Image: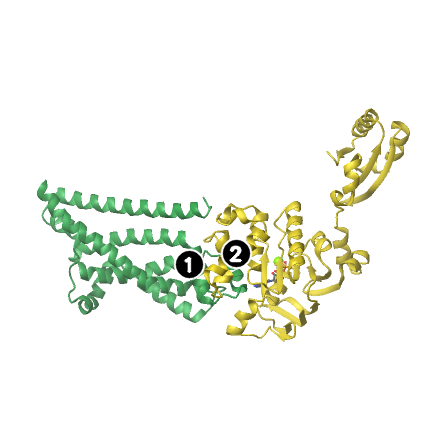
Chain colours: A green, B yellow
Amino acid sequence: MFNTLQMLIEPTLETICMTIVSTIFALILGFPVGTLLCVTSAGNLIPNATLNSVLGRVVNVLRSFPFIILMIVIFPLSRLIVGTSIGTAATIVSLSFAATPFIARIIESALKETSSELIQAAKAMGSTNAQIVFKVIIPESCPAIVSGITLMIITIIGYSAMAGAIGGGGLGDLAIRYGYQRFRMDIMIWAVSIIVIMVELVQFLGDKIVDKIMIKRGMR
Amino acid sequence: MITLKNVSKNYGGLQALSSVSLTIPSGTVYGIIGRSGAGKSTLVKLIGLLENPDAGEIYFDDRRVDNLRGADLLVCRRQFGMIFQHFNLFSSRDVFGNVAYPLEIVGKDKVYIKDRVLGLLELVGLSDKAHSSVNKLSGGQKQRAAMARALAVCPKFLFCDEATSALDPQTTSSILQLIKNIRNKVNLTVVMITHQMNVVSDICDYVSVVDGGKVIESGTVKELVGFPHSKIAKDFVSSLIPSYEKTFKNLLQNSIIFRLYFSNDIVTQPIVSRLIKECQLNVNILSGAVRTVKDQFFGELVLELIGPAQDLKFAVDKLKSQGIVVEKLNV
Ligand SMILES: Nc1ncnc2c1ncn2[C@@H]1O[C@H](COP(=O)(O)OP(=O)(O)O)[C@@H](O)[C@H]1O
Ligand SMILES: [Mg+2]
């Protein structure tokens, strides 16, 4: 029992680390893309059909890759960035890229909820486009952004487990190596349970934050 | 002064405005009235520099503004405030934050902003709501907050697009009163876009009637109400339901006034003379009208009844027994 727990600690920390770091990188890459997708759409702040459709296509293509394939495609890039194509660091590279188009769409649809009337009111006051994005659209969409990021973190936890199949480290890796390849059912169950608890915890926290914002805004 | 010269706007083949010319004198409250779809919001988007006309010119005082771009456009937009039917307040900010927004974006410092915002909230009667969420305000309070926000940068012009259309009559008149109060304190040209004739008659000095994207008729409100020419202007004028509360304010305090509603065959009966003969009352007719709606007649009489209490009760019961709806105006 003690041995089993000890075996679990490192992979758990790895999964947490992979999830957090990839979320941050995916947000850094995906948030601007999502914002651009939103503001360039028809009838929005700076409509630009060409940019919008090119960006939209790229995002769609990347999103339609099955994650495992995308990971393999990204191996050379991982080698370039972190010097290896296996382990936690390499997985972070793939997870970040895999989650980027996903978060871009989530952010896009969250930001699009801001009514065009509200944007028009901000415009009429003489706001610059940057002011409208940063002081109006993003703050107004905060609840939708938070629930979108929650969904994204959960997806990344799932992806990170899948990455285990190709030597990605973390709990998924553990479950495959011990649970599947060495028939250690107990380890498999432990690993899966921890993943389930993580997902539940993230969902719970995300919902709580959204709730708090909504209550503060008098919308609930 | 705002001048529009032959302004037209086309939305994908739909002529929302065609060759509109208007002069809105400084310091006036100028009403623009029209039915839904007449082109009023299009007009306010053009003078609010949110969209460009396809043809024509717009001037603020003597400066042409419809062709401004970039920074000039932003600066020009800061000369006016705008309020809307659906308030368009920011949910992400409390009342204070909403009023502070237009000051923040022009880079005013915190101390100035605090001072100015608190002053504005006092002006609109929302001092105690500074840190409330805007979603917790009533409709009237939301419009007051929006007004404070619109006035934050000391605008020369205030554009109101159906600003009272989502409000009940009492709240509407309190908002109109607020606009009047503000105009007494600061020099402001107000453009009131509305489909409600009572708003025009209550607050406006001048009015233009628009329909189908054209200005049909313009003039002082008194001219329009007294002598409407076009069919649509006549319709608007006849929609002016007399506000008994106002018209009979003094009477209501000192005497007993009833409003009688009745329909169809009762319309042809001598109600008033019966009241006099059969109930021995003195009757003073304050107003009376018969309207037809889909071939049905609807009569309305507002009467001051003078007599002893028991005779009044007898009379009211008698009227009710004939199928007349009787409403006492001063409760
Ligand atoms: N952005 C737009 N695109 C297409 N048609 C529009 C647009 N804005 C307004 N219209 C049309 O222009 C006409 C006038 O609209 P609007 O100015 O909103 O009228 P009002 O405010 O008087 O009700 C309507 O027929 C409306 O459908
Ligand atoms: Mg309108």
Q: Which residue lies under the disc numbered 1?
A: A138
Report whether mark 1 lies on the same chain as mark 2.
Answer: no
Left or right of B80: which side holds B275?
A: right
Q: Residue drawn 35% across and 63% down? A: A60
Residue B205: numbered disc: none
Q: Chain of mark 1?
A: A
Secondary structure found at label 2: helix
Residue B286 in the image: state x and y as whole percent.
83, 41
Q: Amino acid at mark 1?
A: Ile
- Disc 1 vs disc 2: which is toward the camera? 2
Q: Where, by quadrant of the figure, is residue B194 drawn?
A: bottom right
Q: Chain of mark 2?
A: B
Q: Residues within 10 Å of mark 2 (few under 14, many from 20)?
A: many
Q: Which residue lies under the disc numbered 2?
A: B117
Q: Residue drawn 19% across and 69% down? A: A80
Residue B46 in the image: state x and y as whole percent.
60, 67
